Amino acid sequence: MLVFRSAIADWNQVPSGSMKPSILPGDRIVVDKLAYDLAVPFTWLRIFRWSEPSRGDIVTFDNPLDERLFVKRVIGIPGDVVELRRNQLFINGDKANYEPLGADEVAELPIPNTNAHRFFRESVLGDSRVIMVNRRATGTYSTFSPQEIPAGYYMMLGDNRDNSSDSRRIGLITRDRIMGRAHAVAFSVDLDNYYLPRLARFFTDLP
């Protein structure tokens, strides 16, 4: 079982809200460790590599600062030039489109206290997802200058843009640190409500 979880698949508890509204604290996500390559169990050594992470993939990786396991979304791949201007994303000169979610769509989101945030469907280069930003003034990390992603590196951002420790803080992530692709929620509990199960999130695909 340990070898299976190390080399083939795994399920990871999510403790933070950095990927809201896509992933919630208390979600147990399923990670496909064969999505990109085959690794020697319990090591970073890759035996075979058959694909590379794509923009929009949700991946798990080891934080280079403290080796904790993080889950974020791939925003920039090798060769991309990525820029952020007051939470507006540019990739290779293309500005992302931001479509505000309607009141009915926001009401359906599985998170409380939505009045403190704005929600947009962010679309760029054929990829889209729902992100959230604070209604108040944008934070310190809401802007960065154009950055070219070198070979072997990836840029990661959280969907909760103003509340995520990602490549804006920990730097770009090397390919060998990427553990796998997260593709579903196995089950979920509400950490703020006596760990009650969120049945509606059981066995749901990640966006």
Image (spheres, rainbow, N blue to C red):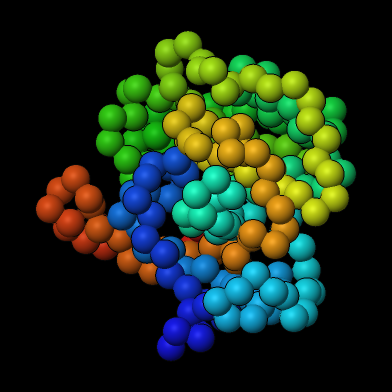
Q: Which residue is more in the foreground, 85 or 164? A: 164
Image height of 164 relative to 203, above or below:
above
144 relative to 65, above or below: above
Residue that appears at 55% across and 76% down: 42
Residue 132 is at least partly visible in this image: no
How far across and down, in percent of the image, does residue 45 sit?
69, 74
Whether 13 is drawn above or below 155: the answer is below
Residue drawn at point x = 34 percent, y = 36 percent: 107
Q: Residue at x 78, y 74 (%)?
A: 49
Residue farthest to the left, as pictured: 194
Indicate the quadrant where residue 156 lies. Answer: top right
Q: Position of residue 56 (x, y in %)?
A: 66, 49
Locate residue 58: give its quadrant: bottom right
Residue 56 or 36: which is nearer the viewer?
36
User: Quarter of the image containing the N terminus?
Assistant: bottom left
Q: Nearer the viewer, residue 88 or 3?
A: 3
Q: Is residue 113 left or right of residue 35?
A: left
Horizontal and vertical percent for residue 59?
Answer: 59, 57
Q: Quadrant of residue 111?
A: top left
Residue farthest along the front direction in this orientation:
66
Q: Position of residue 102 (x, y in %)?
A: 46, 29
Q: Is residue 22 left or right of residue 201?
A: right
Residue 165 visible in the picture: yes
- From the viewer's perspective, is residue 36 above or below residue 193? below
Q: Residue at x 55, y 45 (%)?
A: 65
